[in-house]
């Protein structure tokens, strides 16, 4: 199954499906973990990296078998949801190539959590919402106010693999949430720009789609703090 999303080597993510005990088994054929290993990323020597991997798999209901395939069982009725979950897991796990060092001092999502806590913001972590095509999407955080709702995605590395996925999911959820809650619905990307330059075309893409962003080094600027306020 070809998808429009890019993998680790800028090739498109491909999934494989086969009948299994009356259900449909979806798999990445081991490509995701194999490509990470080619980039020097392993999980056996880093308990922090393994913990983060397990968390991603749990969030999306994905299994990692003995052949190091990412896979999930689906039925005809939930095939689209399971396929989306597998693609989402692959996209997030691909970001491990940025963590190819033997030790990991910090996971950016945890930094964002501490940032929200420091501002005494009440939020829902791992927020799940159903879109217009009846597929559930997951965001890192959700903030609910009386007249506004914000969903947040943290990006340790913003690139052409994960940016389109965020824009698509936020746009699809927006239509449903605004109709249900009668609130404005804001998509907010918090982007790690420590020791790296963020391409202007990525930021322009967010703006052009109606989403917004906070660059990490500017997170305490009044303008950015106002983006989190009611």
Image (tube, helix red, strand yellow):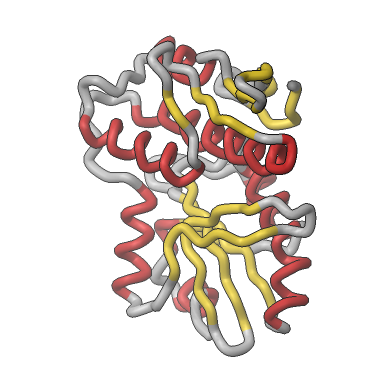
Horizontal and vertical percent position of residue 129:
61, 61
* Residue in the foreground of this view, choosing between 104 and 138: 138
Residue, x 45% and y 29% (percent of image)? 63
Horizontal and vertical percent position of residue 119:
34, 77
- Residue 25 as seen in the image, left or right of residue 229: right
- Residue 216 appears in view: yes
Q: Is residue 149 above or below residue 219?
A: below
Residue, x 69% and y 31% (percent of image)? 5
* Residue in the foreground of this view, choosing between 128 and 199: 128
Residue, x 32% and y 45% (percent of image)? 107
Q: Quadrant of the N terminus?
A: top right
Residue, x 35% and y 36% (percent of image)? 54
- Residue 171 appears in view: no
* Residue in the foreground of this view, choosing between 55 and 107: 55
- Residue 21 as seen in the image, left or right of residue 174: left
Q: Is residue 135 above or below residue 70?
A: below
Horizontal and vertical percent position of residue 150:
57, 71
Horizontal and vertical percent position of residue 128:
55, 59
In the image, farthest residue toward the bottom? 146
Q: Is residue 73 above or below residue 58?
A: above
Q: How many marks?
A: 0
* Quadrant of residue 78 within the rendered picture: top right
- Residue 55 as seen in the image, left or right of residue 146: left
- Residue 119 as seen in the image, left or right of residue 155: left
* Quadrant of residue 208 within the rendered picture: bottom right
In the image, farthest residue toward the front? 22
């Amino acid at each position: 199954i070809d998808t429009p999303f890019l993998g680790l080597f800028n090739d498109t993510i491909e999934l494989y499906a086969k009948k299994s005990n009356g259900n449909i088994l979806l798999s990445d054929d081991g490509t995701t973990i194999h490509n990470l290993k080619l980039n020097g990323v392993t999980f056996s020597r880093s308990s922090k990296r393994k913990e983060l991997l397990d968390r991603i798999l749990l969030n999306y209901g994905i299994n990692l078998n003995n052949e190091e395939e990412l896979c999930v069982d689906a039925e005809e009725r939930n095939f689209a949801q399971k396929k989306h979950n597998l693609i989402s897991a692959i996209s997030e796990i691909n970001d491990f190539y940025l963590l190819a060092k033997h030790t990991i001092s910090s996971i950016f999502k945890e930094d964002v959590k501490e940032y929200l806590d420091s501002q005494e913001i009440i939020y829902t972590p791992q927020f799940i919402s159903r879109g217009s095509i009846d597929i559930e999407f997951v965001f890192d955080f959700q903030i609910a106010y009386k007249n506004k709702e914000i969903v947040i995605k943290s990006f340790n590395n913003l690139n052409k693999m994960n940016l389109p996925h965020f824009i698509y999911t936020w746009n699809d959820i927006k239509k449903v949430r605004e109709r249900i809650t009668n609130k404005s619905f804001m998509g907010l990307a918090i982007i790690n720009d420590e020791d790296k330059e963020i391409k202007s075309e990525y930021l322009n893409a967010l703006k052009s789609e109606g989403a917004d962003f906070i660059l990490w080094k500017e997170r305490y600027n009044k303008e950015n703090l106002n983006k989190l306020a009611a």
